[in-house]
Image: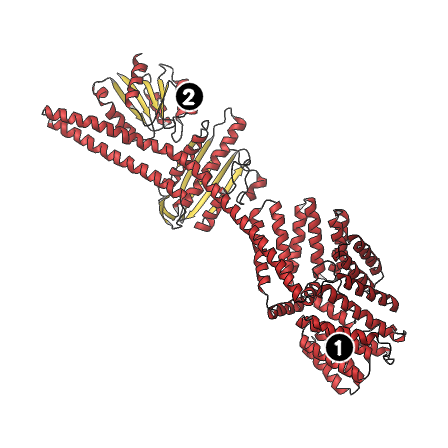
C-alpha cells in the first residue's frame, strides 16, 4: 500500500483522482490523501510521519507556493525522503528548470494525462 | 468722487457761464481730451467745436493741433486711413509761414497742455505743433500702413523739432520710435544704438515712464543675440520701471522676456514663476492676446518639464482663446472689443494724462503695450487687416494641428497602457483556463470508462452497481458543466477587459473580483518572467458582499495595483536575492458604509520625494519602455472620479507599500 499526498488548491482534484485511480484504490494498491495548501500538506506530513511515499503538488497556489513546499519537504522530511512530482499549468522550460534544480523528481503539466502519470508512478514506486 | 459726468457737467457749466471765446476753446479742448479714451463720439464733437472756435478766433496753429487730436479720435473710431487727410491738412496749416498765431498768454498755453516756455519762443508753438503732427504721421505710417521707412522719417523730424524747442521730456520717445523702425526694417544694430541713446536721454527726463518699452526692446535684441545675462538685466530694469509706474503691459513684456531668458538656459522654474505672474496681470486687465501668449508659454514650459497633461491643457486654452479672437471679425465687434480693452486698461489713465499734456508718445518697446495693441488694430487699413487675419488663420491652423497631434499621442499612450495590461491578462488567462480544462477532459474520459463499466455490470445483472455508476457519471457531468462555465467566464472576462467599459455600476462580489484579478495578475507576470515567484496571502472579509461598481474598471485598478506590487517585489529580489522572500498580501474589510481593499507588498516601496507625483499621468519610475506611467493615474481617476471612493498609500522606501482603496457601498 502506497500512500500518496496530492497538494492542489482545486478542490475537485480529490474527486478526479479518486475516480481515475478507482481500480488501484479498490485493489488496495494506492491510498490518496489531499491537501489544498502547502501548510496543510506539511501539517499532514508531520502528523503522519513515514507514511507518504510520493507527493504530487501544484506550483501556483495561494500562500505557500509548490516550489517552496518542495524545498521544505526535501529539507525536512528525510525519513524516508518522499518522491515529489510537480503538477502545474505552467509547462514552460524555466519552471521546469527551477523545479528540477530544487530537487523535484518529475514535472507534469495540466491538463493531466493520467495514463502518463500512472506510468511515472509505477516507475517511481516500483523501480 | 468726481465722476465723468460730474466733471463734464461742471466744465460745461463753466464754459457756458464765461462768454469769453478763448475760455470756451480751452474748455472744448479739455472735454475733447477727457473723452478721447472713453467716448469717441463726444470727444470728436468737442474737438470739432474747438476747431470751429479756433478758426473763428483766427488761431490756425491751435486749429492744427486740434485737427491732430481729431485725426487720432477718428482713427480710434473708424480705423479709416482717409482720416489721414485731416492730418495732412493740419500739416499744411502748420507749415504755412504766412499764417501765425497772435501771441497768447502763457496761462492759455498751460491750460491747453502746451509747455509755457514756448509762448516766449520764436515759432515755439509752430514747432510744437509740427513736432506733434510728425509724431502722429509716424504712427500712421507705422501702425496704419506698415511703411517703416516713411515712419522713420516722420519720427526723425519729430525728434528734430523736439530738440529745436528744447523739449527733452519725451525726446527719448522719439529716439526710441526711430529705433523701432530700424528694428522693423531688420537693422538690429542701428536699432540697438538708438535704443541706447534713448535710454541715456531718458535719464534726464522728468517722465521716464515710457522708457520701459525701450528697455524691453533692448532686452529682446540681446536675447536674440543669446547674451542672456545682458538681456536679463535689461528686462529687470524694464520690470522695475514699469512696476513703479504701473505700466502693466510693459511689465508683462518684461516678465515674458525674462521667461524667455530662463527657457534658453533650460531653467524652467523661474520661467514658470514669471509667466504665472504675467498671466495674473493679463487676466486682471482682461488683455486677451496677452493671456493667450501666456498660455502658449505655459504649454511650452510644461512640455519641457514633461508634464504633458498640463502642457496639453494650456495649449487647449490658448487655441480656444485664439478661436474666440479670430471669431470677432466684424467691425462692430472689433470696435467694441477695442473700446472695452481701452477702458479697462490702466494705460487709459496714463494716455489721458499724456493728452492733457499735449504730448503723445506711443513708445513701442516691442511690447504688448495695450495702446500699441490697440493702435496696431486701429491704424491698420483693410489690406493690413487681411494680412493679419491670414496670419492668424495660419497660426490657428498650426495650433490646431499641434493640438490634434497631442490628442493623438495621448490616445495612443492610453491605448498602449490598455494593451500592456491586456497582454498581462492574456497570459494569465491562458493558464487560468488550463485548470478547468483539466477537469473537463479528465472527467469526460472517466465517464467514458464508467459507461463501459455500466454496460458490463448490466450484462452481469448487477443493476444496483450500474445505478451507482450512473450516479457517478451524473456527478461528473455536473463537474464538467461547472468547469466549462468557468472557462467560459474567464474568456468573457478577458473580452470585457479589452472592450470599452459600459460605465454602468452593477452589484459585484468584491472578494471574487479581487481574487480573480490577483490570480490573473500573478499568472500573467509568471508567464512573462519564469523566475518570478511570490507568497500571496489573502484575507477576505466574508461580510464584504456586493457593492455597485463598474467591474471592468475596478478590475483594471486592481490589476494595476497588483502588477505594481509584483513589480516592486521583483525589483527588490533582483537587488537583494538571498533570503528575501517576496510577499503580497491582499485584504478586504467591510466597514459601515464602504468596502476597503488593502494591497500590501514588501517590495522596494516609494521614495518620499516622488510620493506626490505617483498619481500624475505619465509619471513612472520604471525604465523607458517598461511602463507608460498611466496606470496609477487612470486608477486614481476610476476610484475617485468614477466611483466616489478614495485611493491612498502608506509606504517606506526599501521596505513596503500598502495601497488602500475605499469604495462606497
* Image coords of residue B291 (percent x, y): 63, 58
Q: Residue at x 66, y 47 (%)?
A: B269
Residue B98 vs B621, above or below: the answer is: below
Residue corresponding to mark 2: A71
Q: What colour scheme was applied to this rendering of the protein? A: secondary structure
Is B166 positioned to the left or the right of B305 in the image? right
* Image coords of residue A58 (percent x, y): 36, 26
Q: Can residue B56 be seen in this view?
A: yes
Residue B50 vs A60, above or below: the answer is: below
Q: Is residue B541 visible?
A: no
- Residue B61's image quarter? bottom right
Cα–Cα gap, marks 1 and 2: 102 Å
Q: B352 or B89: which is nearer to us? A: B89
- Label 2 neighbourhood size at 10 Å, few (<14), some (14-19), many (20+)? some
Chain of the residue where label 2 is placed in the rendered structure: A
* Image coords of residue B658 (percent x, y): 48, 38
- Residue B443's image quarter? top left
Residue B19 vs A66, above or below: the answer is: below
Number of marks in picture? 2
For numbered disc 2, what is the local secondary structure? helix
* Image coords of residue B462 (percent x, y): 11, 25
Is B441 positioned to the left or the right of B603 in the image? left
Chain of the residue where label 1 is placed in the rendered structure: B
Q: Which mark is residue B30?
A: 1
Amino acid at each position: 500500500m502506497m500512500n500518496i499526498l496530492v497538494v492542489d488548491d482545486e478542490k475537485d482534484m480529490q474527486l478526479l483522482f479518486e475516480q481515475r485511480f478507482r481500480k488501484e484504490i479498490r485493489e488496495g494498491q494506492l491510498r490518496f490523501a489531499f491537501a489544498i495548501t502547502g501548510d496543510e500538506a506539511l501539517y499532514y506530513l508531520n502528523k503522519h510521519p513515514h507514511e507518504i511515499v510520493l507527493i504530487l503538488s501544484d506550483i501556483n497556489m495561494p500562500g505557500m507556493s509548490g516550489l517552496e513546499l518542495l524545498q521544505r519537504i526535501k529539507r525536512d522530511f528525510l525519513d524516508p525522503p518522499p518522491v515529489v512530482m510537480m503538477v502545474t499549468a505552467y509547462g514552460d522550460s524555466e519552471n521546469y528548470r527551477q523545479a528540477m534544480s530544487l530537487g523535484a523528481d518529475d514535472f507534469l503539466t495540466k491538463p493531466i494525462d493520467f495514463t502518463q502519470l500512472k506510468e511515472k508512478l509505477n516507475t517511481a514506486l516500483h523501480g | 468722487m468726481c465722476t465723468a459726468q460730474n466733471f463734464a457737467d461742471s466744465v460745461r457749466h463753466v464754459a457756458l457761464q464765461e462768454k469769453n471765446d478763448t475760455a470756451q476753446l480751452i474748455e472744448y479742448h479739455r472735454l475733447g481730451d477727457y473723452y478721447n479714451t472713453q467716448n469717441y463720439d463726444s470727444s470728436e464733437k468737442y474737438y470739432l467745436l474747438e476747431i470751429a472756435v479756433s478758426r473763428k478766433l483766427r488761431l490756425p496753429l491751435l486749429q492744427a493741433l486740434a485737427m491732430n487730436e481729431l485725426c487720432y479720435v477718428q482713427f480710434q473710431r473708424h480705423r479709416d486711413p482717409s482720416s489721414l487727410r485731416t492730418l495732412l491738412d493740419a500739416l499744411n496749416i502748420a507749415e504755412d509761414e504766412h499764417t501765425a498765431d497772435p501771441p497768447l498768454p502763457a496761462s492759455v498755453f498751460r491750460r491747453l497742455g502746451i509747455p509755457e516756455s514756448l509762448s516766449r519762443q520764436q515759432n515755439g508753438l509752430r514747432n510744437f505743433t509740427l513736432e506733434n503732427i510728425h509724431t502722429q504721421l509716424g504712427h500712421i505710417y507705422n501702425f496704419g500702413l506698415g511703411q517703416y521707412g516713411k515712419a522713420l522719417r516722420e519720427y526723425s523730424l519729430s525728434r528734430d523739432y523736439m530738440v529745436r524747442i528744447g523739449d527733452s521730456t519725451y525726446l527719448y520717445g522719439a529716439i526710441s520710435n526711430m529705433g523701432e523702425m530700424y528694428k522693423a526694417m531688420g537693422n538690429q544694430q542701428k536699432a540697438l544704438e538708438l535704443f541706447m541713446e534713448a535710454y541715456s536721454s531718458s535719464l534726464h527726463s522728468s517722465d521716464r515712464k515710457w522708457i520701459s518699452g525701450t528697455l524691453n526692446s533692448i532686452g529682446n535684441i540681446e536675447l536674440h543675440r543669446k547674451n542672456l545675462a545682458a538681456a536679463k538685466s535689461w528686462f529687470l530694469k524694464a520690470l522695475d520701471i514699469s512696476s513703479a509706474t504701473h505700466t502693466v503691459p510693459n511689465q508683462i513684456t518684461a516678465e515674458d522676456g525674462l521667461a524667455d531668458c530662463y527657457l534658453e538656459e533650460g531653467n524652467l522654474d523661474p520661467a514658470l514663476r514669471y509667466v504665472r505672474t504675467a498671466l495674473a496681470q493679463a487676466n486682471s486687465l482682461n488683455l486677451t492676446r496677452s493671456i493667450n501668449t501666456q498660455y502658449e508659454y505655459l504649454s511650452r514650459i510644461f512640455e519641457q518639464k514633461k508634464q504633458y497633461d498640463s502642457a496639453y491643457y494650456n495649449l487647449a486654452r490658448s487655441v480656444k482663446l485664439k478661436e474666440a479672437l479670430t471669431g470677432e471679425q466684424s467691425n462692430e465687434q472689433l470696435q467694441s472689443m477695442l473700446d472695452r480693452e481701452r477702458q479697462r486698461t490702466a494705460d487709459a489713465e496714463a494716455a489721458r494724462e499724456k493728452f492733457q499734456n499735449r504730448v503723445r508718445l506711443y513708445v513701442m518697446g516691442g511690447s504688448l503695450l495695450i495702446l500699441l495693441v490697440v493702435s496696431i488694430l486701429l491704424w491698420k487699413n483693410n489690406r493690413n487687416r487681411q494680412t493679419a487675419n491670414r496670419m492668424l488663420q495660419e497660426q490657428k491652423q498650426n495650433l490646431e494641428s499641434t493640438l490634434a497631434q497631442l490628442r493623438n499621442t495621448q490616445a495612443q499612450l492610453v491605448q498602449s497602457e490598455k494593451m500592456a495590461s491586456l497582454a498581462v491578462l492574456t497570459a494569465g488567462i491562458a493558464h487560468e483556463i488550463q485548470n478547468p480544462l483539466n477537469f473537463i477532459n479528465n472527467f469526460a474520459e472517466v465517464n467514458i470508462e464508467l459507461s463501459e463499466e455500466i454496460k458490463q455490470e448490466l450484462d452481469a445483472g448487477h443493476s444496483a452497481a450500474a445505478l451507482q455508476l450512473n450516479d457517478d457519471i451524473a456527478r461528473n457531468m455536473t463537474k464538467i458543466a461547472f468547469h466549462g462555465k468557468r472557462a467560459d467566464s474567464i474568456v468573457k472576462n478577458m473580452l470585457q477587459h479589452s472592450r470599452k467599459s459600459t460605465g454602468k455600476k452593477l452589484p459585484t462580489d468584491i472578494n471574487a473580483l479581487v481574487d480573480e484579478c490577483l490570480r490573473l495578475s500573478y499568472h500573467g507576470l509568471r508567464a512573462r518572467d519564469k523566475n518570478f515567484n511570490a507568497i500571496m496571502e489573502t484575507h477576505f472579509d466574508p461580510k464584504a458582499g456586493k457593492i455597485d461598481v463598474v467591474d471592468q474598471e475596478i478590475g483594471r485598478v486592481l490589476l494595476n495595483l497588483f502588477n505594481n506590487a509584483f513589480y516592486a517585489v521583483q525589483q527588490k529580489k533582483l537587488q537583494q536575492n538571498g533570503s528575501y522572500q517576496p510577499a503580497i498580501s491582499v485584504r478586504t474589510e467591510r466597514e459601515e458604509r464602504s468596502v476597503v481593499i488593502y494591497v500590501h507588498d514588501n517590495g522596494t516601496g516609494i521614495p518620499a520625494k516622488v510620493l506626490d507625483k505617483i498619481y500624475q499621468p505619465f509619471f513612472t519610475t520604471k525604465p523607458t519602455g517598461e511602463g507608460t506611467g498611466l496606470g496609477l493615474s487612470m486608477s486614481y481617476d476610476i476610484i475617485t472620479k468614477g466611483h466616489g471612493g478614495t485611493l491612498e498609500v502608506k509606504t517606506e522606501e526599501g521596505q513596503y507599500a500598502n495601497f488602500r482603496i475605499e469604495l462606497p457601498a
